[in-house]
Amino acid sequence: MAVSSSSWELPLVAVCQVTSTPDKEQNFKTCAELIREAARLGACLAFLPEAFDFIARDPAETRRLSEPLGGNLLEEYTQLARECGLWLSLGGFHERGQDWEQTQKIYNCHVILNNMGSVVATYRKTHLCDVEIPGQGPMRESNSTIPGPSLESPISTPAGKIGLAVCYDMRFPELSLALVQAGAEILTYPSAFGSVTGPAHWEVLLRARAIETQCYVVAAAQCGRHHEKRASYGHSMVVDPWGTVVARCSEGPGLCLARIDLNYLQQLRKQLPVFQHRRPDLYGNLGHPLS
């Protein structure tokens, strides 16, 4: 499907791919370099992956390295957003919530900062990745993390209305349907996909979510080896509402850029009006609009 002929006028977004480690200071330096590069290239919004702050070796280290939203790390990103004049999608922050003292567990919190550095949205990951994949090793996110209690209504940004999710959430189409019916034009799945599920499921799930919701899908990903216990698949990408991959990161840390054409999105939704054709009388109102 053709994009707008005046594509240079369309909002530009940057998708950042990194290899987080337990070294929070070095992780920030890496992310800050990519964010500054995104600003230099003219992006209005930069997306960072899940666990952009760190990837620990075990639940105890995760708890030790975590911070509240009002801590030093988010303050650094607040200053960076202001410095660059850029909106930031911080795709998965290890957050010590208000119940930290009672639970000693964190939230996997997706934070949106505007170009003034203000927190304009927070979404706490609702589907935790407790799985055992042969060849990839067991994952028990719930050992250190509490599932979020609710979805976040889509947030208006210079690129469009963004519906927030995190990684494993992409396996649940009900969530994406709820977000698009609440007005989302862009769905974002910051992730740290494994080396076995990545080649099998990563791209096909992202393209499926884009096609069924007729949204842009932005997926910033972790890549490479984080430490001796964990590695990630990478392949950060942007998918348009037709299901075409319009931008993709190469191997290793770096970024890719994509234009967001909301006129194209609206045109496609008119030509293929699937949401008008839904039959909740037959199968229920899956992914009903958010209240």
Image (tube, rainbow, N blue to C red):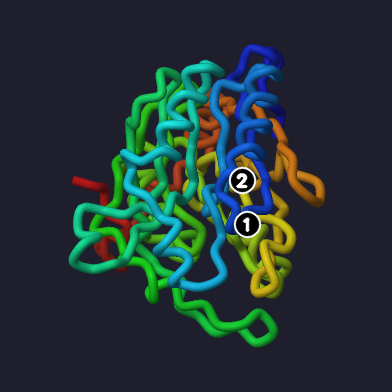
Compared with 146, 267 (above or below) is above
User: Which quadrant is home to the C terminus?
Assistant: top left
The residue located at (53%, 29%) in the rendering is 267
Whether residue 210 is visible: no
Q: Which mark is residue 2?
A: none
Q: Which mark is residue 21?
A: 1
Please give the residue where the numbered disc 2 appears in the rendered image.
Answer: 27
The residue located at (70%, 35%) in the rendering is 1
Q: CA–CA distance between discs 1 and 2? A: 7 Å
Q: Position of residue 89 (x, y in %)?
A: 48, 37
Amino acid type shown at disc 1: Thr
Q: Position of residue 92 (x, y in %)?
A: 46, 51
Q: Are marks 1 and 2 in contact (CB under 8 Å)?
A: yes
Q: Position of residue 250 (x, y in %)?
A: 81, 46
Amino acid type shown at disc 2: Asn
Residue 226 is left or right of residue 182, and the answer is right
